[in-house]
Amino acid sequence: MRAFGLTALATAAAMTVVLPVKAQTTIDVAEITCDQWLAYKVADPNSIALWLSGYYNAKRDNTVVKVEAFKEDIEKLKDYCIRNPDTLVMNAVETGIVQGEK
């Protein structure tokens, strides 16, 4: 009986272990500069590029992603941002360097 009590106590103790929780980070994409985007200062640039693609494609009611065109657009955006580090990334996209589907 004593062994059962110790096992039950150990099980109960193990179930009360608190695991660390990661805090969510909120990002205002409209405030990200090209420099921040290129230098991973906010998040992985590919994650932000994917978000931007979804945002602008949704504005055009487009649900199709052409993967090769998306990759080319990211490279165009990188090139533009290297030359214009203080420009906001969303403004860079809106200059027309990224074509996407219209």
Image (spheres, rainbow, N blue to C red):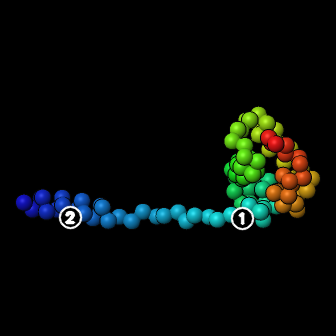
Q: Residues within 10 Å of mark 2 (few under 14, many from 20)?
A: few
**Which residue is located at x 79 percent, y 36 percent?**
69
In the displayed structure image, the side of residue 86 where residue 24 appears, left or right? left
Q: Position of residue 45 (x, y in %)?
A: 73, 51
Pair 1/2: label in front: 1
Which circle's residue, 1 or 2, is located before the other in the chain? 2
**Which residue is located at x 74 percent, y 56 percent?**
40
- Residue 23 appears in which quarter of the rendering? bottom right
The single residue placed furthest to the left in the displayed view is 1
Amino acid type, mark 2? Leu
Q: Which mark is residue 92?
A: none
Location of mark 2 (residue): 9
Depicted 12 relative to depicted 79: above or below: below
**Which residue is located at x 42 percent, y 63 percent?**
19
Location of mark 1 (residue): 28
In the displayed structure image, the side of residue 25 where residue 93 appears, left or right? right
Q: Position of residue 62 (x, y in %)?
A: 72, 43
Instruction: Look at the image and tell me in which quarter the C terminus lies.
Output: top right
Q: CA distance from mark 1 to mark 2?
A: 48 Å
